Structure formats: C-alpha cells, structure tokens
C-alpha cells in the first residue's frame, strides 16, 4: 500500500459510530441491560415513524448490524447496494456496467455472481433472482429506507434458499404522517429527485414514494435513468394489522464495457467502439400482502404473501475477441411466509419463546440468449424455461433459564421440486432429488455482568444449483447432493454507558461440494469448486467520547480457501477463492460543531484479491475510498448538504480474467454532489 493507504487504514480502524436507536421524539437512553440483550450493533439512528420498531431478527444470536435510516436517506448512490459500504465486513463488487452494476457479499464469499450467498429481503419479502442475484435492490431508493438489517452466519433458521452466509432485510418507511423530499445534482450530469410521504389517521396508514435518478456516468457511454414508485397501505385494528405493499421500478442504461490493462491508466473514462450498442432495460415489480395478529395471550401470527416480476433485456460484449450477446431474463416468483410466536409462562424459567414457521417460494423462469451484431440477432444459443419450488419449515425455542443465560436451539428442513425444458432441443429434465435438507442450529448467549455479552452459535445452511445447474441435464444423469455449509461463531459484545459499544467475533464456515456458475456459458452449467473453508475475525467499535462527536470503525480479516478441490483440478488445493479480499475496513467521524451544522468523514477499503481459482493471474482490487459531507439546516424543515465522494481521488478498478487477458472497470474519480432536503 502507499503511504496514504497506510495512514487512511490506520485512521479508519482507529475510529468507531453512533449506536443508539431513537424515535422521532428522542427517548431516554436504553438501559445497558436492554442494549446487551441481543448481539447487534447499530450504525446511525433508526427513526420510528409508526408504532412498530423495524426489527425482525431479535431472536437471532449472531453478528447482526443495523444501518439506520438517517444515514441511508442522505446518501448519493447510483445503486442501493452501495449503501452497504457503511456496514462493516461487507465486500463490494462494482462491475459499473449499467443495470448490471454490482452487488455486496459477506463472510468470504465473492460478489461475482457465481455463488450468491446472501438472502435478500425487502420488508420481509424474498427478493433474490433465481441465480441468487440482487436485482430487486434497485427497486428501493435511499429516502424510502427506515433501516437495513444484516444477519451474518449460518444460525438463522427463518430462511432456507439463498441464506448460505446470512441475510439482509431492507425495511422501508411504514406508518407516520410526514412529507420528506430530497433533490440532488452533481458530477457526471447527475440529478435525482425523491419524495417520501406518509399519512396516518386513526388506525389507517398510507405511505408513498416516487423517485428518479439520472446520471451520464464518469465513463463514456454510461447513461443511466431509473424511476421508482411505491405505495404502502396498512390498517391496525389493535390486535391485528393488515396491509399491502406495491413497488415498481424501471431502468434504462448504457454499458461502457471493460478496458484492457493497456488503457486502464491513461484512458479511464473511455468506452471502446465494440460497446457502443451495449446496455439494456430492466423492469421490476413487487406486490405483497401482510398480516400480523395477536391470536391470544402470548400467541401471535405473522403471514406474508407476495408476487415479484423481473424483465431484464441486456446487450453486452466483453471484448473484441467475442461476439455481442443479448441476454433476456423473465422471472415471476410468488410465495408465502408464515410464522407463529408463542410465549408460555413457565414457573421455573425466566422466559420461554417458541417460534414455528415455514415458507414456499415458487419460480417461473425463462432465460434466453442470442449472439448479436450491434443488436441484430444472428443465432440463438439458449432458450431455457424452468420451474423451481423450494419449501421449508423450522422450529425454534428461545430458552432463558435466568436473565443472564439465553439458549436458542432450532431446526430447519427444506425440499426442492421443479422441471426444466430446453426449448432449443425440446428436451425436458427433472430437478435433482436433493432429498430433505436438514439444518440443525444452536445459539447460546451469556451476560455475566452488566454491559457484557458472550455468545456462540452453530448452524448449517445449503446451496443448490442455479438455472440449469439445479436439474439433471446430460451428461448429468444422477442426482446431486446439495452443498452443505456448516458454520460456527464465537463473539463478545460490550457496552459501557452511552459512549462505548464494541464487538469481536471469530467465525468459520465450511462447505461440501460447493459449486459455482459458469457465468458466460450458454448451457448454464457449473463448475465444482470442491470442499471450501472460510474463516475470519470481525472487530467493530462505536464511540461517543463527547456530546456531538460520534466515531466508528471496523476491521475484518477473512481467509477463503479451497480445502479439497474437484478431482479434475488437483492443483487448486489450498488456493484462495477468487475475488475475495483478505482484509476489509471501514470507519468514520460524525461531528456537530455548532447548532444547525453537521460534518462527516467516513471511508472504507479492502486488500487485493486473486482473479482465478488457479491463483496464477496476479492480484488486483485494493483500495481506500473516503467520503466527506457538510450539512447546514437553514430551518428545522430545510437542510442543505454537500457530499464529496472519493475525496482523495483514488484510482481503483474492478478486475476479472476472461481466459486470455485482464479486463478492468474503473471506479468513479472524485465527485461533488449538492442536495436540498425538505421535511415536514
């Protein structure tokens, strides 16, 4: 690293972040015992606009991080996944290719799209594509976010499919009466308008959101326009609340393509002529019904039903050596989630909670590809139509023999069914018989003294094939077993008054028969990575040393290796898994120097990564990126702000190996944005 990198890393890791959740009318600080009753840390403030606190993972004893809505709402991002830069231990993969912009990953998994190991939910609704991708994250913009909840590890029994390394739930603003608008403009021809409004009368709440963002992009041929709409309607009868959410997003984007190593230094903003017709359009819809009811004393029910739709039409050419492709994806998913919560009174226990639930996720998918010449079809290479149903159930008990001991055993099982048709050949195939996928889990937390909680957990999760990889398509004729991930974690969380909060966690996760998609394979096949081992340590600190001063910092070390490779690739034994940086760090400082003023400086970074599983193409991708923000409140309702991203003008890029050469997607240079926000 350069001297600047070393200094910046030291500064970020030495810092810590605001950790208190508060309502619109600030309440007294929570007692220490209450704030150490779980294992979560909060970055920023959670603003409660309705009668229900936006938390869903209160019974999970794992490393949980919550991003407050105040931080999310004031960010300038082209893509909502970029907000995860504010959460510790998160790897960001920035393709910077129009609608195919990038994604986040955790716990030693990469964001390449080969293995998508995070279950994404929006207001509790499953929001992954069939391949595990996170396209639906584009349907939520920052001003509509109440909180983001990230659960790491293998111990959460609530979800099955895609919940390999954890899950992320984006909670949007529901309830309250308010009008919140934000207009932004800045670098690269960027402009944005967002309006979020709520109206609450009696037990009926209405919330609406409309947003548009356009940018010309730092690089040539990188225009992006996205429009989002959302409506949320809930009625609270007292013991029962029912509601509906409708969300729609459309986007049109150009793709600048990838640069060769020869041009990445001197022509970072260029786009080759081969990419001048690359790009596409994407339409997303998400519609859900919600029910929460207190059925009897100590017994409650939560139910969700949903439909999601995705239409993604993309033209892409990776290099001059290959033809342009058209990739057309159409997916309709629908399903339901149900959970019963029971709190019986047991004389010899301090507290007992029992939870039982289940879900079904049904997918109707079409994936088609063509070779094209400047968007003119020349030949079809894929025409897949396939159904996939994953259904499962779980039971969990939260047993507290005493106020200082919590034991949480759980068990989850899942089943898979479906069929696949190759419409080019007319042949149909069955899904692999994965059997009943059993996932035992156990968590323990001990609070021996006020402010200190020690916890440990164990659990299993699973991975199945994506696309054609889940079916017995020749030459595969026998059933494949699911890849089973077995993980454990041990951690300590400590809270001292209202000025210090910290957590340290050790973790390991191993997988049998891990598979990864061949991203550019027209057949949709996969490679067997073999038995893998991921392990690491996470350190997080939040400090409030003085009134109006908040510090935060995080450091993660992760070690992702191929323990036992596929017999066809024995030389990969012990190699690092590609595109996984070994170190991740983030931190920042928020200061209120005077009334009406707010000043913030924060950053994040990572070390370099290998490009291939063979570990023979060099290491790339390290960076440290800083962001600064200054805000002034003209009145209690009007705030002006300026934000400088990539403050030190770091020159970094996402890099991958296409089989013959490295291809590079440079990140944005220093960029200034100004915004005005109106709140009533």
Image (cartoon, rainbow, N blue to C red):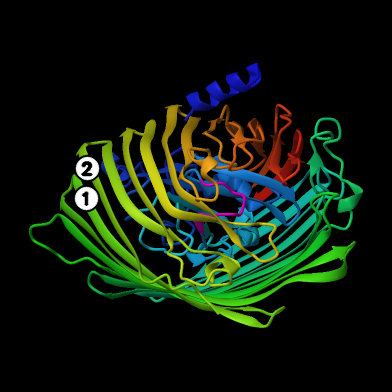
438 versus 96 height, above or below = below
Q: What are the residue bounds of the magenta stretch?
A: 109-119
- Residue 102 seen in render: yes
Q: Position of residue 616 (x, y in %)?
A: 63, 35
Within-10-Å neighbours for mark 1: few <14, some 14–19, many 20+: many
Q: Which mark is residue 307?
A: none
Describe residue 179's horizontal placement relative to residue 202 as left or right: right
Within-10-Å neighbours for mark 2: few <14, some 14–19, many 20+: some
Describe residue 207's horizontal placement relative to residue 240 as left or right: right
Q: Main secondary structure of the magenta part?
A: loop
72 versus 349 height, above or below = above
**Considering depth in this image, is 468 or 608 the residue closer to the camera?**
468
581 versus 26 height, above or below = above
Location of residue 11 (image quadrant): top right
Quarter containing the N terminus: top right
Q: Which mark is residue 406?
A: 1
Q: Report the number of numbered marks.
A: 2
Q: Which residue is mark 2?
A: 446
Q: Is residue 247 magenta?
A: no
- Residue 303 seen in render: no
Describe residue 77's horizontal placement relative to residue 105 as left or right: right
Describe residue 546's horizontal placement relative to residue 516 as left or right: left
Q: Residue at x 85, y 30 (%)?
A: 266
**Considering depth in this image, is 259 or 532 the residue closer to the camera?**
532
Question: Disc 2 versus disc 1: distance between alpha carbons?
Answer: 6 Å
Location of residue 399 (image quadrant): bottom left
Q: Position of residue 200 (x, y in %)?
A: 52, 68
Is the residue under label 1 in contact with that under label 2 (CB below 8 Å)?
yes
SS class, disc 2: strand
């Amino acid at each position: 690293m350069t001297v600047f990198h070393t200094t910046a890393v030291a500064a970020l890791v030495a810092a810590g972040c605001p950790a208190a959740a508060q309502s619109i009318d600030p309440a007294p600080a929570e007692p220490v015992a209450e704030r150490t009753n779980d294992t979560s840390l909060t970055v920023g403030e959670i603003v409660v606009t309705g009668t229900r606190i936006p938390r869903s993972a209160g019974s999970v004893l794992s490393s949980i991080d919550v991003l407050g809505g105040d931080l999310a709402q004031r960010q300038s991002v082209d893509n909502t996944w970029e907000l995860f830069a504010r959460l510790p231990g998160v790897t960001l993969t920035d393709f910077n290719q129009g609608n195919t912009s990038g994604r986040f990953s955790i716990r030693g998994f990469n964001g390449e799209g080969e293995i998508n190991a995070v279950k994404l939910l929006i207001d509790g609704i499953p929001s992954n594509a069939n391949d595990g991708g996170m396209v639906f994250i584009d349907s939520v913009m920052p001003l509509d976010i109440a909180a983001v909840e990230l659960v790491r590890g293998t111990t959460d029994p609530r979800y099955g499919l895609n919940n390999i390394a954890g899950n992320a739930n984006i909670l949007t603003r529901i309830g309250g009466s308010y009008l919140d608008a934000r207009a932004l403009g800045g670098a690269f021809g960027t402009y944005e308008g967002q309006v979020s409004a709520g109206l609450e009368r009696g037990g009926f709440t209405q919330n609406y959101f409309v947003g548009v963002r356009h940018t010309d992009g730092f690089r040539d041929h990188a225009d992006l326009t996205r429009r989002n709409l959302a409506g949320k309607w809930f009625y609270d009868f007292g013991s029962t609340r029912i509601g509906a959410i409708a969300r729609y997003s459309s986007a049109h984007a150009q793709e600048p393509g990838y640069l060769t190593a020869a041009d990445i230094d001197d022509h970072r903003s260029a786009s080759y002529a081969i990419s001048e017709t690359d790009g596409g359009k994407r339409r997303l819809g998400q519609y859900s019904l919600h029910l929460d009811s207190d059925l009897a004393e100590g017994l409650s029910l939560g139910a969700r039903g949903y439909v999601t739709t995705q239409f993604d039409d993309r033209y892409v050419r990776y290099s001059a050596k290959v033809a342009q492709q058209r990739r057309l994806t159409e997916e309709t998913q629908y399903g339901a989630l149900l959970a019963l919560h029971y709190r019986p009174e047991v004389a010899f226990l301090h507290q007992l909670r029992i939870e039982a639930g289940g879900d079904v996720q049904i997918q109707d998918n079409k994936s088609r590809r063509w070779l094209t010449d400047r968007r003119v079809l020349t030949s079809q290479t894929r025409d897949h139509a396939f159904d996939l149903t994953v259904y499962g159930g779980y039971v969990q008990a939260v047993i507290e023999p005493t106020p200082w001991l919590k034991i949480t055993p759980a068990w989850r099982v899942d089943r898979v069914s479906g069929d696949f048709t190759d419409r080019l050949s007319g042949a149909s195939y069955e899904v692999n018989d994965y059997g009943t996928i059993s996932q035992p889990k156990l968590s323990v937390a001990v609070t021996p003294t006020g402010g200190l909680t020690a916890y440990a957990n164990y659990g299993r999760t699973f991975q199945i094939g994506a696309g054609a990889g889940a079916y017995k398509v020749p030459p595969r004729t026998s059933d494949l077993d699911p890849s089973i991930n077995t993980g454990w974690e041990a951690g300590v969380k400590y809270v001292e008054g209202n000025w210090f909060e910290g957590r340290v966690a050790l973790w390991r996760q191993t997988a049998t028969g891990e598979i990864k998609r061949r991203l550019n394979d027209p057949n949709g096949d996969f490679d067997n990575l073999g038995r893998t081992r991921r392990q690491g340590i996470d350190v997080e600190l939040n400090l409030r040393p003085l009134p109006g001063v908040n510090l935060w910092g995080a450091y993660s070390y992760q070690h992702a290796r191929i323990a036992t490779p596929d017999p066809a690739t024995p030389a990969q034994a012990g190699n690092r898994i590609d595109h996984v940086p070994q170190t991740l760090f983030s931190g920042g400082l928020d200061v209120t120097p005077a009334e009406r003023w707010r000043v913030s400086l924060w950053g994040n970074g990572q070390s370099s990564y290998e490009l291939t599983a063979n570990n023979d193409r060099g290491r790339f991708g390290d960076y440290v990126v800083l962001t600064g923000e200054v805000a002034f409140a003209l009145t209690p309702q009007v705030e002006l702000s300026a934000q400088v991203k990539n403050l030190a003008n770091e020159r970094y890029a996402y890099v991958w190996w296409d089989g013959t050469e490295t291809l590079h997607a440079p990140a944005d240079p220093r960029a200034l944005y100004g915004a005005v926000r109106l709140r009533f």
